[in-house]
Amino acid sequence: MEKIVRYTSFVAVGDSFTEGMADGLPDGSYRGWADLLAARLAALPRPPAGQPAGPGFRYANLAVRGKLIDQIADEQCGPAAAMGADLVTLVGGLNDVLRPNCDVERVCARLADCAELLARGGGQLVLMRSPGRRGPVLERFRPRMERLFARIDDLAARHGAVVVDLYSSAALADPRMWADDRLHLNAEGHRRVAEAVWQALGLPAESDWNAPLPPAAPPRWAARRAADLRFAREHLLPWIGRRLTGRSSGDGRTGAHVHPELGAPFWMTPAEHTAPGPVTGWRALAP
């Protein structure tokens, strides 16, 4: 019987994709694939009797929406590496390549800096090729994205990292997996990413994360135009406004598990290991 690796701690760094947008909860917060993965890891059986149990499972999500690769490198990776987690996920750089003036080679070099620093923390590093929504935006930026993703295999070989290839998934490219802003996965998309990472870690599959959605009739012309107008009004124009004024959706924000006054990350741990439940019900440990 194949032995299951039991991770006791998990730190996630990155941007809105890892923060969990747009997998919204009733209280206005976000859940996302990292929270879903943490809850599943925490629910794995504890070591057999007679073996040291160790501390309970701990999790910290340091990701912040809108962050560029320099900000991820400078603000998140050092604290994440210092936490000494068994498992660390790193996803970043897409916010950079979606900007008009982007030095892709510099972004790749900064991603390499992040991987180097996190790998020194000693835990299992996970890198990802992020998913892309099928449509004109993806086609416009595809060459930049593929240059960024091509660097990931080299980083994985250098640091013994696990690579999760979401970019090649036809299922995750389906527009029905994406929120109304057309930039972030919806709840089903995040659930599938959590399953993809779970399987990449060698854990037993619970579902086919890459299964295609059932066929659907194309929306009528009027419905498409109404959706386009709503998208432009609610999402595209505010995004353009932030670009023109040098603002970011992440301005003034800290990661979900970063103390806003101390600027220090803290662990979340289940109130009860046998039934960890959603991360929103976990308790915080002192930073």
Image (cartoon, rainbow, N blue to C red):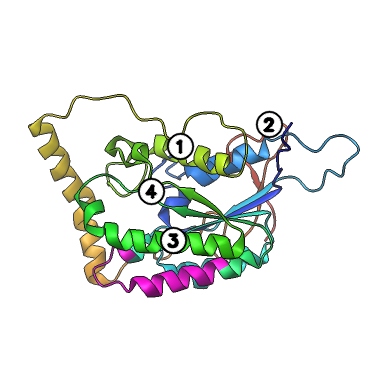
In front: label 2 or label 3: 3
Q: Is residue 114 magenta?
A: yes
Image point 72% across, 32% down: which residue?
A: 274
**Where are the magenta residues, as a range?**
97-115
Q: Residues within 10 Å of mark 4 (few under 14, many from 20)?
A: some
Q: CA distance from mark 2 to mark 3?
A: 32 Å
* Element under disc 4: loop
Which circle marks residue 192 in the picture? 1
Label disc, if present, on residue 183 of the rendered structure: none
Q: Are marks 4 and 3 in contact (CB under 8 Å)?
A: no
In this picture, residue 134 sits left or right of residue 62: left
Secondary structure character of the magenta stretch overall:
helix
- Side of 225 relative to 82 (left or right): left
Question: Of helix, strand and loop, which one carries label 1?
Answer: helix
Near mark 2 (Cα within 10 A), the count class, few <14, some 14-19 or many ≥20, is few
What residue does disc 4 label? Answer: 167
Q: CA distance from mark 1 to mark 2?
A: 22 Å
Give x and y (percent) for residue 80: 61, 63
Q: Nearer the viewer, mark 2 or mark 4?
A: 4
In reply to whether residue 93 is colored magenta, the answer given is no
Q: Which mark is residue 92?
A: 3
Q: Earlier in the sequence, mark 4 or mark 1?
A: 4
Q: Amino acid at mark 3?
A: Gly
Query: How far across and how far down the image is residue 58, in percent?
Result: 68, 49
The amino acid sitting under disc 2 is: Ala
Q: Residue at x 45, y 73 (%)?
A: 109
- The type of residue carrying mark 1 is Arg
Lower position in the chain sequence, tag 2 or tag 4: 4
What residue sits right under mark 2 in the picture?
275
